[in-house]
Image (cartoon, rainbow, N blue to C red):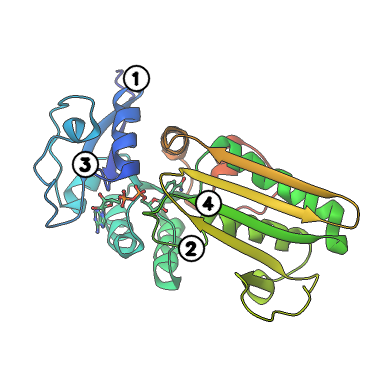
Amino acid sequence: MTGTAIRIAVIGSAGRMGRMLVDVIHRDGGAVLSAVVDRPGSDVVGMDAGELAGIGAVGLPVTDDPATAVAEADVVIDFTLPEATPAVAAACRAAGCALVLGTTGLGPREQRAVENLSEALPVVQAPNYSTGVTLLTALVEQAAAVLGHSVDVEIIEAHHRHKVDAPSGTALHLGEAVAGATGRDLSACAVYGREGHTGPRARQTIGFETIRAGDIVGEHTVLFAGEGERLELTHRASSRATFAAGAVRAAHWVVGRAPGLYNMRDVLGIGGHASGER
Ligand code: NAD
């Protein structure tokens, strides 16, 4: 560790992603895990974050106090629930701390809290921090722009049985990428599952199919089906380590940036999209 190491606070440190983040940050020579926070009333409050992550004690107990944790950090990484987002954003604002937000399924109120924060401080928000999915989004935009309205587009995603939101934030983001590249409004053309007498498919719709099963880490396919051929672009995550590594990379990138709402394409330097796009 050097004097320039960034201090990272992890919110949701007992979760599947939180434990992975504790492990990745602990092994990062350029970062210090400065605080770990979980839900008030959780059994894990007071437990050692390293013990929870399965890497042995790191001497940092889990707290339930985001304000204090954020005050001692350069950047916060939050992978929790949407309900937590406004309080985390408020703590970041009060402390002047950057935010890397991984939580998905935000409603309009929570999204507004993120956007308000980004007017004062740098925020990275991405529904998927993996490098592969960030590239997938760029490839999907390219394919959609070329294929236009000559194909039917369907987005198929699969996740583990514990995931609470559907479709996944990544699937919706891929849908936005297709809609943006073909001049469509996703809220007007999305179809979430089909049942019964649906009639023939309308070309302008973008269909979503959701699978929830077992321990699937995360799989996304964008299917472009035309007459005589189809193109399928697929990403499969086999470990949450990819999301954690991407979020920590985003944390290093965002500290010291100008205020704004950034995404993973900004972090990776893959252009071709409006700044502020999620
Ligand atoms: P999880 O249920 O395993 O963990 C969530 C953790 O947050 C739990 O420990 C819970 O106690 C804690 N928590 C809940 N409310 C809290 C609060 N108010 N304050 C502090 N902690 C609180 O879930 P997970 O699989 O780790 O996923 C968490 C979130 O991250 C979900 O929204 C998921 O969709 C998202 N996710 C995003 C990416 C990405 O790359 N952006 C990747 C994986 C998961």
Q: Residue at x 23, y 44 (%)?
A: 14
Q: Residues within 10 Å of mark 3 (few under 14, many from 20)?
A: many
142 or 90: which is nearer to us?
142
Mark 2 or mark 1, which is nearer to you? 2
Residue 272: where, in percent of width, then height?
A: 72, 46
User: Image check: 71 left or right of 210?
Assistant: left
Task: Indicate the quadrant containing the C terminus: top left, top right, bottom left or bottom right.
Answer: bottom right
> What's the distance in space between the residues labelled 3 and 1, CA to CA?
18 Å
Task: Indicate the quadrant containing the N terminus: top left, top right, bottom left or bottom right.
Answer: top left
114 or 36: which is nearer to us?
36
**What residue does disc 4 label?**
158
Residue 215: where, in percent of width, then height?
A: 41, 44
User: Image check: 245 left or right of 167?
Assistant: left
> What's the distance in space between the residues labelled 2 and 3, CA to CA?
28 Å
Mark nearer the N terminus (4 vs 2): 4
Q: Is mark 3 within 8 Å of ligand 1?
A: no
Residue projecting furthest to the right: 228
Q: Amino acid at mark 3?
A: Val
> What's the distance in space between the residues labelled 2 and 1, CA to CA?
36 Å
Mark nearer the N terminus (2 vs 1): 1
Are the residues tagged 3 and 1 within 8 Å (C-beta)?
A: no
Mark 2 or mark 3, which is nearer to you? 2
In the rendered image of this protein, does residue 167 appear above or below residue 65?
below
Q: Residue at x 15, y 57 (%)?
A: 40
Mark nearer the N terminus (3 vs 4): 3
Q: Residues within 10 Å of mark 4 (few under 14, many from 20)?
A: many
Q: Which mark is residue 29?
A: 1
- Secondary structure of residue under mark 3: strand
Q: Which mark is residue 36?
A: 3
Q: Residues within 10 Å of mark 2 (few under 14, many from 20)?
A: many
Residue 10: where, in percent of width, then height?
A: 28, 42
Q: Amino acid at mark 1?
A: Gly
